[in-house]
Amino acid sequence: MKSKYTVLDMFSGAGGLSEGFFQRGFKFVSHVEKDTHARNSLETRAIYHALRNSNNEEIYRDYIFGSFSRKEFIQRYNELDLPPTGLFQGEISESNEEAVMKEIKTHLDVIDSDSVDVIIGGPPCQAYSVAGRGRKPKQMKDDPRNYLYRRYTSFLETFKPEVFVFENVLGLRSAIDGTVYSNLNEEVAKLGYKTEAHILNAKNFSVLQDRRRIIFIGWKNEHNLSYPEFPENLSRKFSVSTLFKDLPFLQAGEGTEQATKYSKSFSRSSKYLRMFKIREKNDVLIQHKARIHNKTDLEIYRQVINKWNCEKRRLKYSELDPDFQTHRNKSSFLDRFKVVDGKSYSHAILAHIAKDGHHFIHPDINQLRSLTVREAARIQSFPDNYKFEGHRTSQYAQVGNAVPPLMARGIAIEIEKMLKEIL
């Protein structure tokens, strides 16, 4: 049995899926991501894991505390002579994929490995989104991102992993009249893989969020494997409100991006946060700054929070006081303003949170605002010491686009079991 299994991460984003595999001790060959800020977040996190594994975590803590710049942080890491992170930044296309593959093969030699055991990832989901197709049907149908799955299958063909994980939104099944889904299955089968696709919900992986995704898991035909049976959810007795109780009270525009104190000590924080290592003993709070909202939005927030907290009902846009109905369209997209359910699971945190926050309103009427980056990250199950690089709009998008790390960890555990059977 191999001591460490190697993994290649495609379309990595800020690293939610990677995080689950990092936590299980997988050895990363490379990560491939085109967005600069997401790539930087993932690089920062990859360095964190390398520092932690080499007993140099204090360098990361000093960076989180703001003791030095990111440039100096990377410089200090490089001075330790630890393996490079192997990140490739850029969009993969038919014209450049061969060059990218060559770089990855070079990095395999650097980390002293001769093969890729697992490929994970999923192309950008916007092209497969049912909502996106509804808004711009012609544009979405012609979107070249619809065909990025072919870049994924090209890497399968070249690196021939024993197992792969392909994640995406449910809309993948119906994209371009179902041809994307059927073509993906056919191409993978031609490459010699048995594949199953199941719809999995993040809340069944102890994430406090109702978030359904389609997860393909494939393995080489010669292996006697089957789709994993994932264990029972451990978080049913917890609610979203438990995620927020140790966070400082904020109103619109308040808070800070920098390191600051929690409102409660570690021992008095939620059992959920401690059980699933969202918050650890020596953590500091970062990226907990609330957006500024105008008076009209604040009054709308007040109305929708009241309706939700008192009647457990979503207030439709057409039901707002007429003075606040500024949009001409009053017949569709009526859930423009949506409160996070503090007493149960949150609805899905999406990249749309980067735009205005109206769909992700804090349930506490006394705070009267949308979620901070850290609150959204906690709902997604990111550890508090996970730093998102770039401006705040990008941070929100990175959080919303990510696979919840607890879900990723649950998948990684089962992939590890599969590999132990065959390697």
Image (tube, grey):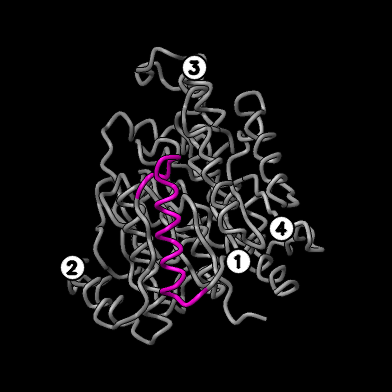
Which of pointers 3 and 2 lies earlier in the amino acid sequence? 2
Camera-nearest residue between 200 and 349: 200
Q: Which residue is mark 3?
A: 138
Q: Answer few, some or many: residues within 10 Å of disc 4's Cα (few below 14, many 20 plus, some between 14 and 19).
A: many
Residue at position x 25%, y 49% in the image: 391
Which of pointers 1 and 2 lies earlier in the amino acid sequence? 2
Q: Is residue 121 visible?
A: yes
Q: Are marks 4 and 3 in contact (CB under 8 Å)?
A: no
Q: Quadrant of the N terminus?
A: bottom right
Residue at position x 35%, y 32% in the image: 299
Which of pointers 4 and 3 lies earlier in the amino acid sequence? 3
Q: Looking at this rendering, what residue extends furthest in the right direction?
A: 224
What stretch of residues is rendered in magenta? 90-113
Mark 1 lies on a secondary structure that is loop
Residue 219 in which image quadrant: bottom right
Q: Answer few, some or many: residues within 10 Å of disc 2's Cα (few below 14, many 20 plus, some between 14 and 19).
A: few
Q: Nearer the viewer, mark 3 or mark 2?
A: 3
Mark 4 lies on a secondary structure that is strand
What mark, if any, has residue 126 been given in the picture?
none
Q: Nearer the viewer, mark 2 or mark 4?
A: 4
What mark, if any, has residue 219 been given in the picture?
4
In the visual, does 25 lie left or right of 336? right
Type of amino acid at the residue the image marks with label 1: Asp
Q: Are marks 2 and 4 in contact (CB under 8 Å)?
A: no
Q: CA distance from mark 2 to mark 4?
A: 43 Å
In the visual, does 330 lie left or right of 287? right
Q: Which residue is mark 1?
A: 117
Q: Which residue is mark 2?
A: 69
Q: CA distance from mark 3 to mark 2?
A: 45 Å
Q: CA distance from mark 1 to mark 2?
A: 35 Å
Type of amino acid at the residue the image marks with label 3: Lys
